[in-house]
Amino acid sequence: MRDSNDAGQGPENRLCMPHPSLRRHLLPILLYSLITAVVTYPLVFQLGTRIPGGGDAPWFLWQLWWFKHALIDLTRTPLSTDLIFYPATEVVINWQTPVNEFFLLPLQLAVGTVPFYNLLILGNFVLSGYFMYLLILKLVKQPLLAFVAGAIFAFNAYHSVRSLGHLSLASTQWLPLALLLLIQAWYKPSIRRGMAAGIGVALAMLASPYYAAYFVFPVIGCFAVYVFLTRRFSLLARPGVGSAALAGLVTTGALILPFYVDYLSSTPELRQAAQVAAKSVFVYVADLLSWILPPRNNPIWQSITAGLYDKFTSGYLVESALFFGFLPPLLALCAFFERRNHPRQLVFWLLLAASTWLLSFGPILKVWGTQLVDWMPYRLFMALPGAYAFRAPARLGITAILAATVAAMYVLKRWKAQKPQWPWRRLIAIWTAVLLANLSTGFPFPTSSTQIPPVYKIITETPGEFAILELPSGELFLENVAWYMYYQTSHQKRLVSGYLGRRPASLINQTHTLPFVNRFFVDDYANYFSGKWDQLIDWPDSVSSSGTKWPGDILNGSQLLSDLNIRYVILHKDLPHAGFVESAALLLDHALGPPIYADADALLFETKKTTLASRNAPAFAYDVPADDRPAGSPPLLHYRLDARRLALSGPAVELATFDLPFMGDWDIRGLLDGEGVPGLRFSADGNSVEPVLVPLFANVYAFSLQGHFAPGQHTLQVQHSAAASPEGDVCIVAFYLHARLKQLDLPQSQDAPSDFVNQNGQRFRLLGAGIISDSGSASEPATYFYTAWQTLGSTTPITAQLCLDQFTHITTPDGAMLAQADHQLGWSGIVDSEGVENSSKFVDFVEVPLNSAAIQPDSVVRIGLWCPETRDYFWVADSTGLDDSGRLVVGSWADLQVPKP
């Protein structure tokens, strides 16, 4: 049934538009394409190398890639992954924009992920303008006004800013298309048109779940009110309305159900995460000024608007970009006062514009960042079931912009009819140009490089499955994490970090519990926002300048990460947060050694199993006081050297003197600071050496020197290179130097090895033994007895073999007990020259309880092996050297002493 106001009107005012000419379609598409190319310049020339904006943009790149990778390459469901939040194995992934992730997948396969993303962004601008053009052409029948409306809707601040990071919300073209198809089905109802309208609504809902709540829901609600006010007596009399509506509902349901069932069946943990996130609804709201101020980075207005936006956006500028011109909202306001002089359907558009505009302010009304009203209509929406899933009321603004633009075009149409003598084409052309200039969010359009940093070449070329830890990460650095996920599309290794729109607490908390890793995930928002980024690293409370008084998770950091299969740590030189980078670099160097790669953007640290790494202590039991060594850890593997400040001028200067307890391959390393560090020459005990110097930041260098050292005192000297020596003294600060044992040279205490065997034929060979005084690595001197072993005739790894106890007795020459140190053997592996752990050899250390008065040089050390679980003893195959109790006499206290430094 036709509106009474429409009856008798001419062809220009009929709702059923004549078939448009091809020119009527091609010309606006070409013009919108041209405007898009200008507005987004230079993106059209960088389709494969850059993307608009940043923020969530690289995360959307990862989303597009992951759904393609899972569906096509892995032929599996994309709704879970093990690539992020390692070591979690089933991280739930939600669809973000199914229309782009699934329905347009063939285009991604054809052109690649980055070009595909850029084509989507550019296409969103063109199609948003074109579909809005078609909608207005349907309603007001004037191509010129339709073109202006398309420009307003396509290039308003909301859409432009969303294109810099939110692919889903930037897909606004489906909104006017859905309304156009709904209008066609309303005025000429049929099953075919109902199905077309259902497809349009589904496309809007599949662009973003937010458009289901913030577009479809308000449209349905306002249409219901409109029908009740204006059509309630004639609705049932219209033939075909019911069948068209049913066809539309079935079509929409069939298209969205496979994707929305993912949202509707969320786990309790995800629902809880959404409810927690919903508490920020008071932040993501529209400020009244955001409707009337041009964009912050507009090239014409930014000198005025930038300072104003800073005062009320609170860091969430993206949620405060709602400007769609000065004149369009005024025209829409005029439509409200002139509504009796316009077609009846204008009531619907005014209802939609007014309601969504009010709702965009959220539960409170803010003006210039100040709360003026504490109750707004959005609180009614918050009371609806499931409303907690939507926490950004400002996103209702795009629906208000669309509806207000339609109302504005009705007013312009009427004014044109009233003033036909005015040069409307020229006026509208000038207005459109000025409008587009005012809407610009920046020129040139902000873009970010998608080039994979060189550091990832090493990771990509490293075979095997492993994880990488990228820093800075965590809740304070989500924008960084989004880029790490994009880089993962190249190397495809698992990430300790991760980013999702809704992150369950368990995923966030696991980084706070992983040993050593947790030191880089301090979620201290106060220090973050105050610029104290170095405080975001959990450094030990107190670290002595000498002695091994560092917490065990730092001393054994490389081993811990290696046990977790975290192969690499990448520290990105995030200049805005330099304090975090510098603090993290110092801690990583201390725990893992110098980076194996460094450039202007990143440092790459590699984790390895440490030589003689203790297996007596559990891998994660490191919550011990800073001054204590972890229980069961082998001694003398980390040897702290004094830090010094040097003024170099000419002859060699002593950098450090240090004592090493026994012979082996040692790694001397630390941090040096000074302008002259790269020009230094190093010598150890008078012999020239070539250390590894890797720049960390500013004038700070990671220092590493590897060599074979005998027990005793050693001297490390430095002097200027003649060619590189600057004039005057150069101050060199050694932040710390410390020695780590890489390979132990075992002194043989037996003329021939002794083999221990049990009744089951298990055989262990004693390779050597000795006594070491640990006077430099603990607050109290300690003495350790070590034994070196080899398993014979077994391919089973040491760690999987039967747990053994070694009883260690210190006796008088005639066998009277002086002290004993019975204990479970600690599996401390020996590595070969290539740094690979030998699976059959291991060393055991045990602290000997000393009584200096009782133990004499002729005291004897006796040992034996047994299994306490089965009470199965091992005996020595060659009885030579056994005492009457079956213990092996290893040697006298004096003979077993490793020469002291």
Image: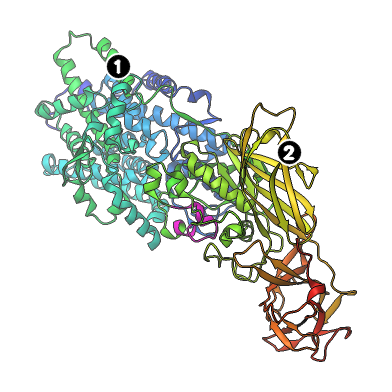
Q: Is residue 696 left or right of residue 301?
A: right
Extent of the magenta region = 508-522
Q: Is residue 519 magenta?
A: yes
Look at the picture and state if 386 lies above or below 823: above
Which is nearer the eye, 303 or 108?
Answer: 303
Whole-number angstrom distance, CA of label 2 to CA of label 1: 72 Å
Query: What is the x, y in percent for residue 171?
Result: 39, 36
Q: Identify the amino acid type marked 2.
A: Ala
Q: Is residue 33 magenta?
A: no
Look at the picture and state if 748 lies above or below 161: below
Residue in the image at 32% along x and 40% along y: 197
Q: Identify the amino acid type marked 1.
A: Val
- Residue of label 2: 652
Look at the picture and state if 754 lies above or below 189: below
Quadrant (top left, top right, bottom left, bottom right) of the C terminus: bottom right
Q: Is residue 499 left or right of residue 714?
A: left
- Residue of label 1: 434
Name the secondary structure under disc 1.
helix
Quadrant (top left, top right, bottom left, bottom right) of the N terminus: top left
Residue in the image at 74% along x and 49% along y: 715
What is the residue that sits farthest to the front in this orientation? 853
Which is nearer the eye, 748 or 47?
Answer: 748
Query: Which image quadrant is residue 163 in?
Result: top left
Name the secondary structure under disc 2.
loop
Q: Is residue 470 left or right of residue 863?
A: left
Label disc, if present, on residue 36 of the rendered structure: none
Query: What is the x, y in percent for residue 520?
Result: 50, 51
Q: Earlier in the sequence, mark 2 or mark 1?
A: 1
Q: Is residue 789 visible in the rendered structure shown here?
A: no
Which is nearer the eye, 783 or 125?
Answer: 783
Which is nearer the eye, 177 or 721?
Answer: 721
Query: Which image quadrant is residue 768 in?
Result: bottom right
